[in-house]
Amino acid sequence: MTDPSQTPSLDLPDGVAVTGALKPGYEQILSRQALELIATLHRELEPRRQERLAARQEVVRAIADGEDLDFLPETASIREDDSWRVAEHAPGLVDRRVEMTGPTDRKMTINAMNSGARVWLADQEDANTPLWENVVEGPMNLRDAIAGTISFTSPEGKEYALKTTDQAQLPTIVMRPRGWHLDEKHITVDGERTSGGLVDFALSMCASATLQLEAGKGPYFYLPKMEHYLEARLWNDAFTIAQDALGIPRGTIRATCLIETYPAAFQMEEILYELREHSAGLNAGRWDYLFSIIKTYRTRGRDFVLPDRNAVTMTAPMMRAYTNLLVRTCHKRGAHAIGGMAAFIPSKDEEVNKAAFEKVTADKQREAEDGFDGSWVAHPGMVQTCLDVFDRVLGDRPNQVDNTREDVQVTAADLLDVKATPGEVTEQGLRANIDVGLQYLATWLTGRGAVGIHNLMEDAATAEISRSQVWQWINNDITLTDTGEVVTQELVERLVDEVVTTLPGDASNYEEAKRLFLAVAVADEYADFLTVPAYEEMP
């Protein structure tokens, strides 16, 4: 039982309430400065955040009525103006040839900092869960890593520590906050829930920005799940407010935006433009992009039905259009283009390893030759493989932003050509979606957001694409090519019961995950995000 005398108290600004449990050290992260910044950001930006979330629904309704995504006519002047470029590359973000991703728990933080990657995407979003302890302890762990004071001892007695405290020799930390759609229920301002993303951002800024600048780097962020350039403008305004509040020069913050939603693929230049003073580039996020295709075009029939998840590769025509356009757009504006995730986890099975390393090498080779400046891996054991590929292509150059890919000409029709994606819908693929979705959700509900499943590191995007595909197949009466059965609610419910018996551990451990999965996978109405109702199930 917690000793009441050891429970910290908070210096709360007017109108701010914190309902999450407090542990020793939390008061350093939930400082008055941080809570005042959260309050300022909320009061100035929350009405616009709600407007942008409502605008997302307008896009879905327009597409349901037969309209299609396209490059915006009202921003043609931005795309046609060749004179503007983003800010010069920031210290620590010049060479990004391999980026490690992962949640911000203490053990992972140390392993990531020791991984040999050039950048660590410290993930407070899809590889994390918004459990209250993670919200506060993530920024605490990043602060300690930058200060060189972090250590960890596992329950088994194994000790973890940094190999060096020289920040110049360690990966540059780029923190990913939550997306605009997620609230933070434990911190309210004037009685209203706050934005989860702005909470993550403010806590990180107040805990670490000064330390990062003293280390010769800076406060850097990955921005997820934006669907419109005005959402990027919202982030840019948040950066300006925070820099002014903390007395940091404007332009110190840098942000890399994930182009992982279908609407954003048509607004890459506009997103760079809105953040140009703070921009560090764009990233191609594969699974969330596929999830967004389904979500955005869910009412438009079989032309937008995707085959089995594992059959959709980056060589599909629509994916080639998307990634080539991303590289062309970034390099035209002097920004970094960062490739997608290699989710493989090294196995004890050498045959599995051999095949996986060959696939990862080929994937990274394609990205490097396409002009990407770096790429993601999800496990320290994959860092060297990615590094070797980019070393061969880049040589002594820190990046290849000078490769402007003027040969690339991508039309809206190219991005929308989902029906050209090769592959089939099979019972094996349906079972795989159920398997991974249930395993991931069961772990997510316990507070862990990065889960090793079948030798792959899975995050929330995994559960989203898995349940979205099931919903899409049901609502389009898709016939499974290997069994001839039509995908129905009854079939999915039967397979869920069958798959649960094959999962690791006791079947009773999956009851809550099963309920949540079915609640969105077979529902009449499509839920925009699985993590929104799941968050309400958390303490």
Image: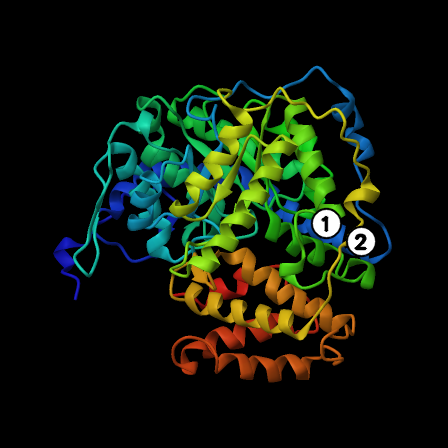
Name above or below for residue 290 compared with residue 340.
Answer: below
The crowd level at tag 2 (other Cα within 10 Å; few <14, some 14-19, many 20+) is some
Q: Earlier in the sequence, mark 2 or mark 1?
A: 1
- Residue 512 appears in the rendering: yes
Residue positioned 35% across, 23% down in the render: 213
Name above or below for residue 210 compared with residue 292.
Answer: above
Question: What is the quadrant of residue 210 in the picture?
Answer: top left
In the rendered structure, are the residues bearing label 2 and label 1 in contact, judged by CB atoms less than 8 Å apart? yes
* Left or right of 212 on screen, residue 439: right
141 vs 186, nearest the viewer: 141
14 vs 455, nearest the viewer: 455
* Left or right of 77 on screen, residue 525: left
Question: What is the quadrant of residue 232 in the picture?
Answer: top right
* Left or right of 136 on screen, residue 517: right
- Residue 12 appears in the rendering: no
Q: Amino acid at mark 1?
A: Ala
Cα distance in 3D space between marks 2 and 1: 8 Å
Image coordinates of residue 25 in percent, x first then y, are 22, 46
- SS type, badge 2: helix
Name, please, the residue furthest toward the right: 66
Residue positioned 19% across, 54% down in the render: 158
Q: Provide the residue designation for mark 2.
A: 420
Q: Amino acid at mark 2?
A: Ala
Quadrant of the image for the C terminus? bottom left
Q: Which mark is residue 316?
A: 1
